[in-house]
Image (cartoon, rainbow, N blue to C red):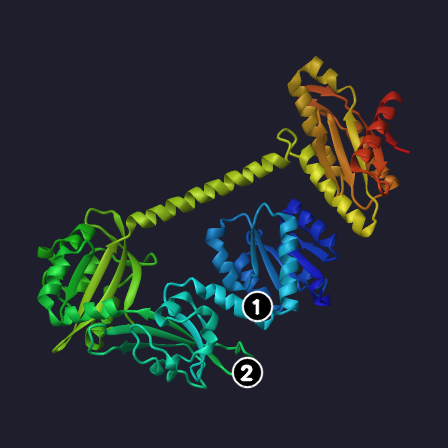
């Protein structure tokens, strides 16, 4: 790992999340700092030369997307990871576009985060070799249904997918032995014309139409997309990636429309999609029954009316923003004057209000038909309301499932009565301490604590009093321990405390402080006041010892304390 990827800043106000992330990253040698408030962000940024940022999108008082953009501007070579409890479907794309490198949903799997971070650092430090790029291109294009191939400016083939092999009749193992100009291809009678499109200084993607077998029964049209590759795969000469899309049926439809308007009008009337035809003045001359069903507006009402006025009746909106009639009028007039070709034909989504008041989500396409004195505008409109509603429903259900999953994760880790870690969660975190010890050999100790004479509270005052004592003691312990310490309910009236990077002497000081606070505390429940004390056994982890042995030693020390009069902390030998 390069030196500049040691320093990490975690920007999150969730203490448990930040501590888990800090522990796993520091166990791997990272220098990890925590920022839990917007006010301290500038100060945190000055503490070190950070090259890795881990950000919560919902940090109180700060818009996470803006912070990602700002960090990407100020630290262009840095790694930015996003963690959030928000729906990934809403925020993943905007985070990536703003400059994030990876996106994690809460609850965060710290080990997975570490693995992804290590991979990112490796990719940045060690660029992919040329051979891997070749394999990546091959796998990406091999399964595409349209022909794709790569040539140099002379027409020599480097790659071709299965669709191109079918078109050309070549064998994949021998593809590099052929030149495009020498091939006899189905539906393409002049492949040399494709080679001529490759220019040495070409920097941008080109899109063009090509016709082959002109005048023959198998005349074919293709949309040809040519992409100059920025880095030559073979290391020296420039290469060009071609994608071919067969548009013969579209061209045939255009000719059908141009040459036989009456048949086209018949086609309009029978179509399940809404279709309309607008004359050179912007007036409606065709409006089929499907469009009446979709909008609730009949042909009798619209015939001869201006299309921008009709659309304003339905209060048309694009991306939930109203479209003013004057804007529609300007666009339609320009389309009728100049026409729409393949590069500026319009396809989009919009919403209108049906004549009965409900909202309809539409997918529309606009095209123009050339006539003697200009163009006519065609509209194809499909009701997409059911699909949109399905997507909304699926998104809502996904969010509910995500919330339920998070709640289940919480229930699996948290004791429902005291709202502190349960035994399972403490055992997982003890494993982290073992990992840290094996790497850095820093000591840690733990203490098993038991409430003295707990049974008398239940027997004398009822189980409500017993539950109150448990909750109150958990609260006092949380207020007394350090931020890095771990507190959990071990079982019944027993609690466990883990003191990271702390030997038995240091652990005894903290445990004694807790015991003293509980002894002095006034426990009052429903006008009944009781005194409570605890006894604890404390053990420091010994090298090579199994964790259950350390816990057992702490438990044995606890029982020594019970037999010595209770209300004390006993350190294991």
| Badge number at residue 169 | none
Task: List the single residue furthest toward the right.
Answer: 573
Q: Residues within 10 Å of mark 2 (few under 14, many from 20)?
A: few
Picture layout, residue 318 above or below residue 16: below
Residue lying farthest to the bottom in this orientation:
200
Q: Residue at x 39, y 79 (%)?
A: 180
Q: Earlier in the sequence, mark 2 or mark 1?
A: 1
- In which quadrant is the N terminus drawn? bottom right
Q: Dot 1: within a 10 Å radius of its alpha carbon, few (fewer than 14), some, or many (20 or more) residues? A: few
For the residues bearing labels 2 and 1, Cβ distance under 8 angstroms: no
The answer, for residue 375, to whether it is visible in the render is: yes
How far from the left and from the top, in percent, is residue 199?
Answer: 42, 85
Say whether residue 213 is left or right of residue 494.
left
Splitting the image into 4 quarters, where does residue 154 fall?
bottom left
> Can you give x and y, in whole percent of width and height, for residue 204 in the image?
43, 79
Circle 1 sits on which residue? 132
Please identify the quarter of the rendering in which residue 448 is found: top right
The C terminus sits in image quarter: top right
What secondary structure is found at the residue carrying circle 1? helix
> Is residue 483 visible from the viewing direction of this image?
no
Image coords of residue 446 (percent x, y): 80, 37
Residue 320, image x, y percentages? 33, 56
User: Going by the image, does 505 lie left or right of 310?
Assistant: right
Name the residue tied to disc 2.
236
Please tell me whether mark 2 sits on a helix, a strand or a loop: loop
How many labels were placed on the picture?
2
Would residue 322 be found to the left or right of residue 452 on screen? left
**Which residue sits at x=41%, y=76%?**
205
């Amino acid at each position: 790992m390069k030196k500049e990827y040691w320093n990490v800043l975690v920007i999150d106000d969730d203490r448990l999340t930040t501590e888990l992330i800090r522990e796993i990253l520091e166990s791997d040698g990272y220098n990890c700092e925590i920022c839990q408030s917007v006010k301290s962000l500038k100060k945190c940024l000055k503490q070190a030369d950070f090259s890795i940022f881990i950000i919560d999108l919902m940090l109180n008082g700060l818009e996470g997307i803006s912070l990602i953009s700002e960090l990407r501007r100020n630290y262009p070579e840095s790694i930015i990871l996003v963690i959030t409890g928000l729906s990934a479907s809403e925020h993943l794309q905007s985070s990536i576009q703003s400059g994030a490198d990876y996106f994690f949903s809460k609850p965060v799997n710290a080990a997975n985060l570490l693995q992804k971070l290590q991979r990112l650092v490796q990719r940045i430090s060690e660029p992919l070799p040329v051979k891997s790029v070749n394999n990546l291109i091959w796998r990406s294009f091999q399964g595409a249904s349209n022909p794709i191939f790569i040539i140099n400016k002379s027409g020599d083939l480097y790659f071709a997918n299965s669709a191109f092999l079918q078109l050309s009749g070549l064998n994949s193992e021998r593809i590099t032995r052929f030149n495009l100009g020498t091939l006899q291809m189905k539906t393409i009678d002049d492949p040399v014309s494709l080679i001529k499109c490759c220019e040495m200084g070409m920097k941008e993607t080109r899109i063009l139409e090509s016709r082959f077998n002109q005048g023959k029964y198998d005349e074919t049209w293709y949309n040809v997309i040519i992409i100059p590759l920025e880095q030559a795969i073979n290391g020296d000469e420039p290469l060009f990636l071609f994608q071919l899309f067969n548009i013969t049926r579209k061209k045939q439809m255009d000719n059908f429309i141009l040459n036989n308007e009456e048949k086209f009008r018949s086609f309009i009337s029978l179509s399940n999609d809404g279709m309309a035809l607008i004359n050179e003045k912007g007036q409606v001359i065709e409006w089929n029954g499907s469009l009446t069903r979709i909008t609730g507006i009949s042909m009798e009402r619209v015939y001869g009316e201006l299309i921008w006025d009709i659309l304003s009746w339905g209060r048309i909106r694009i991306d939930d923003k109203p479209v003013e009639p004057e804007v529609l009028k300007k666009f339609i007039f320009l389309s009728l004057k100049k026409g729409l070709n393949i590069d500026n034909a319009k396809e989009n989504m919009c919403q209108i209000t049906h004549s009965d008041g409900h909202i309809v989500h539409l997918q529309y396409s606009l095209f123009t038909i050339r006539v003697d004195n200009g163009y006519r505008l065609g509209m194809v409109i499909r009701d997409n309301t059911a699909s949109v509603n399905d997507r909304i429903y699926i998104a809502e259900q996904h969010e509910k499932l995500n919330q339920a999953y998070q709640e289940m994760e919480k229930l699996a880790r948290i004791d429902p009565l005291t709202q502190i870690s349960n035994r399972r969660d403490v055992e997982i975190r003890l494993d982290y301490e073992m990992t840290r010890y094996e790497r850095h050999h820093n000591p840690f100790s733990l203490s098993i604590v038991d409430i003295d004479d707990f049974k008398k509270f239940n027997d004398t005052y009822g189980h409500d009093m017993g539950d109150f004592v448990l909750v109150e003691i958990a609260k006092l312990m949380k207020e007394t321990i350090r931020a890095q310490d771990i507190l959990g309910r071990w079982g019944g009236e027993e609690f466990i405390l883990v003191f990271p990077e702390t030997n038995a002497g240091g652990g005894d000081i903290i445990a004694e402080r807790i015991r003293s606070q509980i002894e002095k505390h006034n426990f009052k429940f429903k006008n009944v006041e009781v005194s409570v004390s605890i006894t604890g056994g404390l053990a420091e982890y010994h090298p090579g010892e199994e964790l259950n042995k350390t816990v057992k030693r702490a438990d044995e020390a606890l029982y020594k304390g019970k037999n010595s009069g209770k209300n004390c902390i006993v350190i294991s030998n």
